[in-house]
Amino acid sequence: MAEEKELASAEEVENEAKQAEDAAPDTQATATEEEQADTSKEDLKEQDEEREETEGNEEKAEEKKESGKKNKKLSGRAKKDKKDEKIEELNDRLLRNMAEFENFRNRSEKEKTAMFEIGAKSVVEKILPVVDNFERGLDAVTDEDKDNGFVKGMEAIYKQFCTALEEMGVVPIEAVGKEFDPNLHNAVMHEEDDSMEANMVSEELQKGYMYKESVVRHSMVKVVN
């Protein structure tokens, strides 16, 4: 009986040991699972942190990119403004130069015209005595000699002179029967004449001429008192 009890006790001890051995892997597995769960949590946490850090970096990169674009736009605008200012400055300078050149050309044209008129008047002044001599010679011709070929030739030359002067803009000043004008007439004699009003030109002693709008030679006249 005692031996049986000892055998039973030994069997129970063996069973308990076997159960303990069987339970040990379960415990170890549970511990391993817990460790794995903890590791997974840590991994997830690290992944979340990494994702947050990545998102933050992406946001920063995007902000930096946008800031770079803005700075680039501002820099481009500043460069464009300087370029526009330079263009405006050059345009203003060009317009000023064109205006100055136009004024210079107009001034030069006026000076050239004035010089031409002065030269023309000088030539006309030298020609007028020749015309005067033609008129004196023709006035001295008698009625008998008017049909003479020489006289007719002189008359033709005189008319040609007058036509050339007229085409140049040289015209005689009207005097007889006109009111005395010191700008046009040169009074060298005075007379009493009841048939005419006072200050009227009664006789022209020498014909005066105008070149365009300026007087080349004043008319030498006799004026009624």
Image (cartoon, helix red, strand yellow):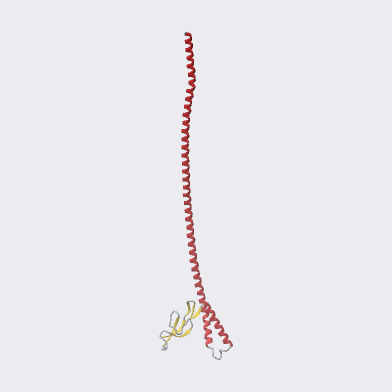
Q: Position of residue 1 (x, y in %)?
A: 47, 8
Give left or right: position of 135 versus 195. right
Q: Position of residue 157 (x, y in %)?
A: 56, 83
Q: Position of residue 18 (x, y in %)?
A: 49, 17
- In the depicted view, which residue is nearer to us: 199 or 42? 42
- The residue that appears at 49% across and 14% down in the rendered structure is 11
Query: Is residue 55 depicted above or below 83 in this figure?
Result: above
- The residue that appears at 48% across and 18% down in the rendered structure is 19
Tell me the quadrant of the picture where the C terminus can be found: bottom left
Residue at the extreme right of the image, as rendered: 149
Q: Is residue 225 visible?
A: no
- In the depicted view, which residue is nearer to us: 149 or 40? 40
> Total of numbered circles in the picture?
0
Q: Position of residue 89 (x, y in %)?
A: 47, 58
Q: Is residue 44 visible?
A: yes
- The residue that appears at 52% across and 85% down in the rendered structure is 135
Query: Is residue 177 depicted above or below 116 in this figure?
Result: below
